[in-house]
Amino acid sequence: MAKGSSTLSDQLDRFVEATPPDRDRFVDLLRVVSIAVVIVWHWALSITRWEDGALSMPNPIDVIPGGWLLTWALQIMPMFFLVGGFANYAGWRSVQDDGGAAREFYGARAHRLLLPPVVFLVAWFVLEVLLWLVRTDHRNVLEWGTIVFIPFWFLAAYLWVVLLVPLTARLHAAGGVLTVTVMGALVALVDVGRFHLGLEQLGLVNSALVWVFVHQLGYFYRDGTLERIGWRGQLSLVLAAVAGMIVLTSLPVYPRSMVATRELAFSHMWPTTAVIAVVALLQAGLAMLLRPVASSWLARRRVWKVVIAVNAVILTVFVWHMTAKVAFIGLYEALGFELIAQPTAAWWAQRPLWVLGPGVVLGLLVATFARFELTTRGR
């Protein structure tokens, strides 16, 4: 065991040493922070309970005074797409510099993005077959409420924007601010059609278009625009986004919370609304304001080594984190405990348990399955 740990540590040290001087380490940190927020929210800040024989996960934001305001920063999915835009634009430019085209770009991205989810699906299929052979009346994945597949909506949306990179990168090079402005206007018009004209099916259009807009913002990070506007420009972006959020969430059609709550089933995430596009602008501005301080911190070898380690297995962590929670729920109930269905004082007191318990299970799952993702590193 010691030898294996040493080997892993040595490998990470080599990655640290190989870090190019011009690498934007803050992007890697944003990816790690984003995944951490998602996991903690899913594990500890959702009221996981049994409803009609399946698990559901409503949010307790409505019982926290002013809790809706936290969701403006902690509904972190826009940050994933912002970082993805940075990485994909860099990857596309690299492929072009090497004389490649869309085929090479798609090949590299597909191998990296699809292998961990495919391994996940195969593993779950094998597990379901084995459990059925042992006991046909076991709780199958559908009875668990399919919450283990929650990460897949993000992966589907992300693959969609990756497929568009050759086009959106060209539009960015040709139009820059004009391109993203037109995208933003289209997002707004689609929501007008959905809520003012009652064309609810348009929600699906924005569920695709909003993420293209957010991903496009990442191009401005990669080409240096968000850095060149300086702290005054970044602060102006934040203030403008906050003003936009206040105006939009004052309208009767848009709730203030960016997540669905127990009292309000409406979700800004699905179908995705124009408000999420404004959240992305807010988070982009905040991130850039924090970047100088964070970059100095990331220059520390130990800190950077941890960031590299998490990023090396980040898709494995993401696709398996809800399985870890389900496994811990099974253990918790097998020991005779029951899930608390309301955000009582006892529920809040248990929150550390619902970080540590699934965390241990996830550690075991990552140790088992991370090897597949590690084979994609460097592609």
Image: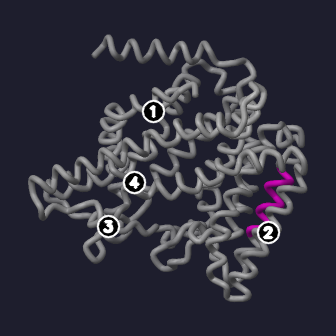
Q: Nearer the viewer, mark 3 or mark 2?
A: 2
Badge 2 marks a residue whose secondary structure is: helix
> Are the residues flagged by discs 2 and 4 in contact, CB closer than 8 Å?
no
Residue under the image location 30 percent in, 35 percent down: 364
Dividing the picture into quadrants, the one containing residue 8 is top left
Name the kind of residue labelled 2 in the image: Leu
* CA gap, disc 4 and disc 1: 23 Å
Mark 3 or mark 4: name the one nearer the start of the chain: 4
Residue under the image location 33 percent in, 50 percent down: 323
Mark 4 or mark 1: name the one nearer the start of the chain: 4
Mark 1 or mark 2: name the one nearer the start of the chain: 2
Per the image, the residue denoted by label 4 is: 43
Residue under the image location 32 percent in, 46 percent down: 122
Q: Nearer the viewer, mark 1 or mark 3?
A: 1
Kindly tell me whether residue 116 is visible in this rendering: yes
Name the kind of residue labelled 1 in the image: Glu
Q: Main secondary structure of the magenta part?
A: helix
Examine the rendered structure and indicate whether residue 34 appears above or below residue 62: above
Badge 3 marks a residue whose secondary structure is: strand
Q: Which mark is residue 373?
A: 1
The magenta span reads: 235-245
Name the kind of residue labelled 3 in the image: Leu
Per the image, the residue denoted by label 2 is: 186
Examine the rendered structure and indicate whether residue 25 appears above or below residue 140: above
Q: Position of residue 277 (x, y in %)?
A: 72, 62
* CA gap, disc 1 and disc 2: 37 Å
